[in-house]
C-alpha cells in the first residue's frame, strides 16, 4: 500500500482522480484540457497513479484511455482505516465517498498474471478453462460478429445480440454481455424483481486487453455500456474481482479458487 499512499499524497494526483471520477475513460489530451498542468506533468502523475493501481488503461484505436480503479481506496478504507487517527481516517473516508458518490457507468480492473499471452487467451476462450474458474462455457468460433451461446449451471442462453465484437488473439477480446432470461435467473437464484430490472437495462459489453509485462502478463478488463444506476453494474462489480482472482490462481497454480 506504500505506492497508494504516495500517490494520494499529491493534490494534483487527487485532482486527476476527481476528474476521472466525474467522467471515466479520458485520454491524456482530454485530461490536460481540464487541468492547469503541463502535458508532461499530467503524464508523470498518471504513471504514478497507474503504478499504484488507482487507474487502469485501455486502448481505443491509437488513443489511450484512463479509467479510475477505486479498489485500492476501498482496501485502505475497509482494512486499515481504524489504525490511523480520526483526522486521517476522515480524509480517507471523504475520498472514498467522493469516489463512490458520482455515477460510474463502467467497471475497470487490472491484474498481473504469471503466464503467457497464449495461455491467458486460452483461459478466456476455452470451455475447459472457463468452466473451472467461472462455471460458464461459450459456444462460438471467436470470430468478429459471430454469435455466442452461454452455458451456465446447465442452462443455455442464446440471443442474436450475444456476439463477438472484437477478436485479436493473444491481444484483445471483446463481446456483448449475455441476455437475462428467466431460465438463467432460476439457475442463479435471481429473484423476479431483480430480473425485471436487469431485463430493462441496455446490453453491456466486456473487453479484455492482454499485454506482456516482463515475465508476466497484464490483463485489463473493461466492462462498460451500463445505464445510470445499473443493477447489472452493481452485480458485475462484485463478481469480477473474485472471478479474475480465481482465473489468476488457476493459471499460476493449476487450480482455481474454491
Image: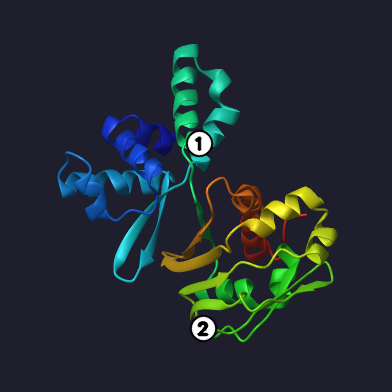
Residue at 61 percent of width and 75 percent of height: 161
Above/below status of 45 relative to 214: above
Task: Name the residue beneath numbered marker 1.
Answer: 100
Query: Camera-side residue: 35 or 112?
Result: 35
Count every numbered label the image shows and give the total: 2
> Is residue 48 toward the left or the right of residue 168 in the image?
left
Residue 133 at x, y = what percent? 71, 63
Q: Which residue corresponds to mark 2? A: 144
Dot 1, how many residues are within 10 Å of its Cα: few (below 14), some (14-19), or many (20+)? few
| Image x and y of residue 103, in percent | 49, 42
In the picture shown, does residue 43 fall above or below 185? Answer: above
Within the image, what quadrant is residue 248 found in?
A: bottom right
Identify the element where label 1 is drawn. helix
x and y, in percent, of residue 13 in the image: 31, 37
Question: What whole-number distance in Å separates the C-alpha atoms at marks 1 and 2?
Answer: 35 Å
Name the residue located 62 percent from the left edge and 47 percent from the top edge: 234
Mark 2 lies on a secondary structure that is loop
From the viewer's perspective, is residue 120 above or below residue 197? below
Quadrant of image for the C terminus: bottom right
Residue 78: image x %, image y %?
Answer: 59, 30
Dot 1 or dot 2: first in sequence order is 1
The numbered disc on residue 12 is none
Amino acid at each position: 500500500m506504500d505506492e497508494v499512499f504516495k500517490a494520494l499524497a499529491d493534490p494534483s494526483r487527487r485532482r486527476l482522480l476527481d476528474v476521472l471520477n466525474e467522467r471515466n475513460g479520458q485520454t491524456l489530451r482530454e485530461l490536460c484540457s481540464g487541468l492547469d498542468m503541463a502535458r508532461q506533468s499530467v503524464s508523470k502523475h498518471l504513471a504514478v497513479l497507474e503504478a499504484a493501481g488507482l487507474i487502469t488503461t485501455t486502448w481505443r484505436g491509437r488513443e489511450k484511455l484512463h479509467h479510475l480503479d477505486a479498489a485500492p481506496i476501498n482496501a485502505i478504507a475497509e482494512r486499515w482505516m481504524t489504525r490511523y487517527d480520526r483526522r486521517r481516517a476522515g480524509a480517507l473516508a471523504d475520498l472514498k465517498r467522493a469516489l463512490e458518490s458520482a455515477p460510474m457507468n463502467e467497471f475497470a480492473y487490472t491484474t498481473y498474471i504469471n503466464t503467457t499471452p497464449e495461455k491467458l487467451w486460452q483461459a478466456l476462450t476455452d470451455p475447459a478453462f472457463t468452466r473451472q474458474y467461472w462455471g460458464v462455457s461459450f459456444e462460438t468460433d471467436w470470430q468478429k460478429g459471430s454469435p455466442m451461446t452461454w452455458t451456465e449451471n446447465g442452462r443455455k442462453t442464446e440471443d442474436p445480440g450475444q456476439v463477438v465484437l472484437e477478436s485479436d488473439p493473444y491481444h484483445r477480446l471483446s463481446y456483448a454481455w449475455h441476455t437475462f432470461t428467466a431460465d438463467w435467473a432460476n439457475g442463479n437464484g435471481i429473484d423476479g424483481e431483480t430480473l425485471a430490472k436487469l431485463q430493462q437495462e441496455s446490453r453491456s459489453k466486456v473487453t479484455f486487453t492482454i499485454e506482456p509485462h516482463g515475465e508476466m502478463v497484464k490483463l485489463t478488463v473493461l466492462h462498460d455500456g451500463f445505464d445510470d444506476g445499473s443493477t447489472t453494474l452493481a452485480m458485475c462489480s462484485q463478481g469480477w474481482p473474485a472471478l479474475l482472482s480465481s482465473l489468476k490462481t488457476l493459471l499460476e497454480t493449476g487450480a482455481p479458487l474454491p
